Amino acid sequence: MKPIVAGIIGTLGMATVVVLSYITAITYFFSIGKTAGAYQVITPLNFHWLQLTEKLQIDLGIMLDPISVMMLIVISTVSLMVHIYSLGYMKGEKGFQRYYALLSLFSFSMLGLVVAPNIFQMYIFWELVGVSSYSLIGFYYTKPSAVAASKKAFIVTRFADLFFLIGILVLSFFSNTFSFEVLTNPAGPILSSPIASTFMGISAISWAMMFIFIGGAGKSAMLPLHIWLPDAMEGPTPVSALIHAATMVVAGVFLVARLFPVYYFGAPEVLNIIAYVGAITSIFAAVIACTQTDIKRVLAFSTISQIAYMITALGVSGYGGHEGLGYMASMFHLFTHAFFKALLFLGAGAVIHAVHSNEMDSMGGLRKYLPITHITFLIACLAIAGIPPFSGFFSKDEILVAAFHKDLFLFGCLYVGAGLTAFYMFRLYYRIFWGNSNREYHHTPHESPATMSIPLIFLATLSVVTGFIPFSEFISSDSIPFQTHIEWSIASCSILIAVLGISVATIMYRKENTMSDKVASGVKGLYTAAYHKFYFDEVWLFITHKIIFNLVSKPIAWFDRHVVDGFMNLLSTATNYAAKKIKVVQSGEIQDYSWAFFMGTILIVVLLVFL
Amino acid sequence: MFFAGVYGFLSRRNMLTILMSLELMLNAADINFVVFNRFLYPGQLEGTFFALFAIGVSAAETAIAIAIIINIYRNLKNIYVDEVNKMKF
């Protein structure tokens, strides 16, 4: 089919989904509304699929509760923006139809993931999302780096999914159900009676929850499983916007949020671990992002850092009403981050489309040539830095408040991370749009076509207004809305450090100067380590090549080749040998045959007479 | 007489000689039938009838055997059984 037809079909399909999800959200939150003060879980569809034992069954269906409806809005909106944007960005590319087919597959999988009523369906769609991501990262399959990156993404997330599966199995074994409604019911069988069995001193449910978190950490690129996300930037930029900024990477956060009552009541120490992993990842990724020169890599590390914020917010959260502030803040940040991160990636795509390169060194002074991209990118940078009245300020502030009231170390990490976020985002902004203003370009960069600019403008509008949504009226840890207000003491501190970060970046990068090189040579060791992403890739490669391949794979391969195949070869050799010996009997001589016949008759007669 | 026929069948090279041993076996069986008839069932004649039929059948079968041997001769130019051994492994 002609490429544009595929594009139109994909976009129209997605637009239908957007309309449906908005209708669903409005109906859910306003028409159906609250029952006894809480938003109810509605299951419009539940199809009994497999019966594993008498008590355990797998259903397929759709479940609506506040966070899944919110995710429906996020996913469908961002996906529609990416569909429209790709009409312009991917124009003329080979494989245009395949691209749209894969985008639709991805959207389908992600939507199925968020409406899953039981954990097994979520796992099925989880894997589907991983496969779509693999296909889309490796879209330019003739490029070896893209192929390697897609393999890396799939293998790392698949490895984490092994732990996820073990967690699911342990959890369902002890609770005899897969369904989220039953598992997360605070008055239900799982949480009200402790599960007594333990393994090495830690209760079974803690192990299950820990493993499930590891699965989520792989998908959401937490330390040390973050290695796949920077390399995943080999895919087309709209793919990076959809999958690796707004939707797939928040699947881990969504998973923890879904199972939050089980985490809070059943395994609170795991929540603590989650919070620490999140905080350390966020500051780690922020430091690396300060040194990268490929604009998509900077955005990738920024994503890792922001998702770590969401995870930390979940980790410090309590349950019920105002205690559950972290939960609400995490979901709020997920909501706003999806929009401004998608905007950043799509804007980066517009820049790459204009200058045909990913590196910061080939950019500078682009604000004259790309006005729409410039303004929208600036809005997104202000949002992510946390400057009021943009959306990022509200969500990030809630997270900082929640962390402050729980643990000062976590608050410290997130606070420093916020400053670093502002710094590296504005470093990125200035290097692209200001910097060397008199730069000569081989061919004048041109502003993107309308199909690319309209999503940018729409997402920028969303980044500005979504901050004012009273999110706690809709999402909270126990589905009962509560009031939040801005705690100005912490808010002012966060604004302060964001402004500090922006000013440092302005001084260093607005005009071309050598300040950044002097700073870099001042902290030479740290700079080199951060530039090489703290050598995590090398460590993982070492572990897989030297340790796993040599100690595990090679013996197993030897066993397979020599013992298993050897046994089969032995069977065939023995058969051949026996056959050679036996075939002499068939001599072709008639008299031999009649002799055998005669002897046989005598034998039968003897047997019959004497037995 | 029967076992003499068996011996001849299994050890001769010439196909016509094998045919003669075959006839010997058949005739031995017929003599057996008539004798048993005479000494066990003196009043009845079924044994003799069967022997009569058997002789007729053996004549027909001998004719066919000779036809086959003539065909073998035409293809191999001799009638030794150890030459007819193509259907082996």
Image: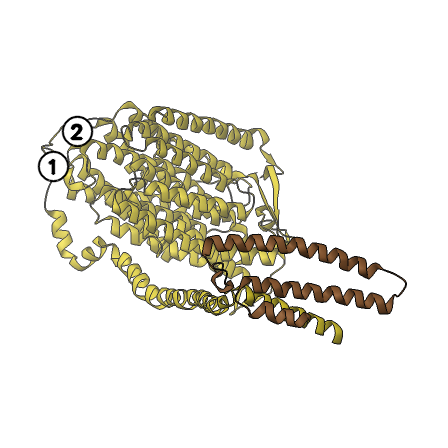
**Same chain? Circles 1 and 2:** yes
Left or right: B45 as drawn, with respect to A517: right
Query: Can you give x and y, in whole percent of width and height, for residue A443 in the image?
Result: 13, 29
Task: State the hue of chain A.
Answer: yellow
Quarter of the figure that contains the C terminus of chain A: bottom right
For the residue marked with disc 2, what is the amino acid? Pro
Left or right: A479 as drawn, with respect to A289: right
Of the image marks 1 and 2, the number of the one nearer the N terminus: 1
Whether residue A301 is situated above or below residue A469 in the rendered picture: below
Query: Can you give x and y, in whole percent of width and height, for residue B14 in the image?
Result: 53, 64
Residue at image position (44%, 27%) is A13
Instruction: Tell me the chain of label 1.
Output: A
B19, A310: nearer the viewer: B19
Query: Can you give x and y, in whole percent of width and height, for residue A489 in the image?
Result: 37, 46
Residue A445 disc label: 2
Task: State the hue of chain B.
Answer: brown
Which structural element holds mark 2? Answer: loop
Assess disc 1: are there few (<14), some (14-19) or many (≥20) residues with their C-alpha within 10 Å of its C-alpha. many
For the residue marked with disc 1, what is the amino acid? Asn
Q: Is residue A316 visible?
A: no
Q: Which residue is mark 1?
A: A436
Q: Is residue A356 visible?
A: yes
Query: Can you give x and y, in whole percent of width and height, for residue A278 in the image?
Result: 38, 53
Instruction: Tell me the chain of label 2.
Output: A
